[in-house]
Image (cartoon, helix red, strand yellow):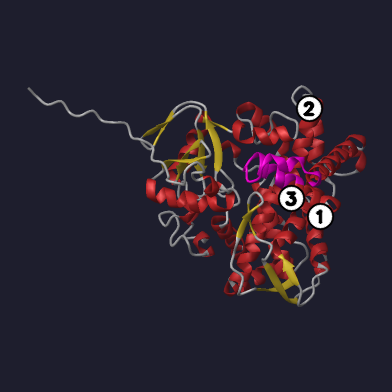
Amino acid sequence: MTNAPYPTSPRVIPTVSGPPVIGSITQLYPHRLRAFLTAAYREHGPVFNVTGLGQTYTVLAGPEANVWTVKEGHRHLRSLEAWRPNDQAFGVQRSMISVDGAEHRTFRRTESRTYARSYLGANLRRALSVTAEDLVPLRAGDDLPVAHWCKAVITEQLARVVVNGTARPYLNDLLSFVQNTLMVRVTRQRPPLVEQLPGFRRARARSLGMVEALIEEHRRVPAEQAGRAPDLIDDLLAAQAADPAFWSDLDLRVATMGAFIAGMDTAANTLAFVLYRVGLHPELVPDLVAEADTAFQDGPPSMDTLGGLPHLHRFVMECLRLHPIAPAMTRTVTQDFEFAGVTVPQGRRVIIGTTVPHGLDGCFTDAARFDPERFAPGRMEHRRPGAFAPYGLGTHICAGSGMAEGLIMLNLAAVLRTLDLRGDPTYVLREVARPTATPDDRLTLRVNAVRHPAVSLLA
């Protein structure tokens, strides 16, 4: 008689340990998430579970997860459950970020033109005028409040460029409404009671009133009558006229509000981290300043000029690697799939740890070190499959990545051209989530001198 081999048991997905009941929930906040998932990846490999408050999430992480997501994610994952609560806050059941397939492509075709790098290039002077306005008051000896300054500048730039409006009178309302809505509905950092507070309700009413007034003005005076190029709202109104069954008035309101959400929670926070690194690495600043001076020597730069500044570009890329604003993506499994030797079941909520590879020495040499030259020709470490994903992955990759990177490069060059800045050697970075990660309000840069008048940026 021969002995039959023991049956092979299916691999069980390991679970990250955590306190009873709350589990790992506090580690899933955006400013802690990448470090937490990276540590768990090192211990458990590319697939593991995390639990919290009675929910289980399966995490796919590492370069292998990123490669799988690009190739197979659209077949097995959907966005609806992660973003439906945010849609409902605006009175709709869907938006570009919450749907997949044909519906997502329809939203994306209409909304993405005015978030493109080329669109910013055609409106670069208008964006630069905002930077100049917000640099003019600064004098030698002043402190630049980094996080707030970046939010004010980027939000106003997107208002003027993307929807031909202004956010200046509404900035505090927009910050309160948008950030609290996301922290209640999406990241769940705050309780639903926040939405009932009088201050929030006022901010919501003023923010939505601003957006509705912009849409009504565009209806009343179309682009051709106003003598301007069509913007996002014009594109939305044209889409509604062509397919009114798809585009409701509320859909237009949400899409228009997206211009402001994009500014204050992606590009602005990234720019804040970039300026933090300017203060932290004075040894790298002379090369950056030299390129900024070159960019502005013949007047406002073009997008091609900005794209040809290697030190500035590598500096920004390294900031995107070490301080990614979107550290992961949350999805729901639409059908069972196999990954890394395990079966992930239908209905399971999954977290794709898209930026875990950013902190792995196997993807980036001495990954914890700030080294912009890792993006230089001859190294190009980010070109390794699955290694670099600061804007997400797959069909939902950030539609505004070109606009965001262009604004960051433009504002960094303008700041360095205008100001001689010094970091506070006693400052220790403390990240907060509002809802995406940003340096806290204690981060300031001292204006050592005004190198060139801010108004000369437009000369």
Q: Earlier in the sequence, mark 1 or mark 2?
A: 1
Instruction: Tell me: 254 left or right of 105.
Output: right
Task: Mark 1: give few (<14), some (14-19) or many (20+) Cα within 10 Å.
Answer: some
Q: Residue at x 52, y 43 (%)?
A: 22
Per the rendering, the mark at residue 120 is: 3
Per the rendering, the mark at residue 77 is: none
Label 3 to label 1, Cα distance in Å? 9 Å
Q: Quadrant of residue 45?
A: top left
Q: Quadrant of residue 297?
A: bottom right
Label 2 to label 3, Cα distance in Å? 27 Å
Front residue of this view, candidates 405 and 337: 337
Q: Which residues are magenta?
A: 177-199
Front residue of this view, candidates 7 and 109: 7
Query: Disc 3 residue type?
Result: Leu
Residue hosting label 2: 248
Instruction: Tell me: 15 left or right of 138.
Output: left
Residue 194 colored in magenta in the image = yes
Per the rendering, the mark at residue 126 is: 1
Query: Disc 2 residue type?
Result: Ser
How far across and how far down the image is residue 411, in percent? Answer: 72, 61
How far across and how far down the image is residue 259, in percent? Answer: 75, 44
